[in-house]
Image (cartoon, helix red, strand yellow):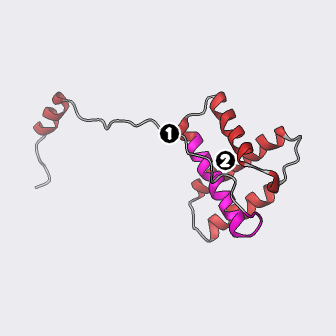
Amino acid sequence: MQEYIKQYREYLEIERNYSIHTLRSYENDLTQFAEFLGSETDGAVEIENITHRSIRSYLGNMLEVGFTKKSIARKLAAIRSFFSFLVRIGVLQKNPARVIATPRLEKQLPSFLDEASMAKLMEVPNTST
């Protein structure tokens, strides 16, 4: 699986021009996924044998360990994209991650200035003229 991760990273770097930070994140996410699968199968990970159940097991494990839903959603996005790449280059016939729903993220309300902060902001003299 590591060879496919390396090919995918090269694709993202060369053809998609992703930033170094995005490349590292995707590579780390996929390597963690491969390590999880390896621990479940005594080290032997055949890319063709990875199913949606394998991926769900990984996501469930992350939830148990304490990852946030936002982190899990990001890792799932990396896994989905990786398998789409494998389908595109002909390694797989279908993407096993495609059928997995993204975890619902908690919605956060926007923060506003309180009345005192707004009044203080309005008192500052305009020095730009």
Task: Identify the residue shown where x is 70% and y is 44%.
Answer: 55
Residue under label 2, please give it: 29
Q: Is residue 77 above or below residue 65?
A: below
- Looking at numbered disc 1 in the image, what kind of residue is underneath it? Arg
Reply yes or no: does residue 82 show up in magenta.
yes
Reply yes or no: does residue 74 show up in magenta.
yes
Regarding residue 43, the answer to whether it shows in the image is yes
Q: Is residue 89 above or below residue 26?
A: below
Regarding residue 32, the answer to whether it shows in the image is no
Residue 23 falls in image quadrant: bottom right
- Looking at numbered disc 2 in the image, what kind of residue is underneath it? Asp
Number of other residues with Cα within 10 Å of mark 2, as a class: few under 14, some 14 to 19, many 20 or more? many
The magenta-colored residue range is 72-93
Task: Identify the residue shown where x is 61% and y is 71%.
Answer: 15
Task: Identify the residue shown where x is 77% and y is 60%.
Answer: 4
Residue 32 falls in image quadrant: top right
Q: Which mark is residue 104?
A: 1
Q: Disc 1 versus disc 2: distance between alpha carbons?
A: 19 Å
Residue 12 falls in image quadrant: bottom right
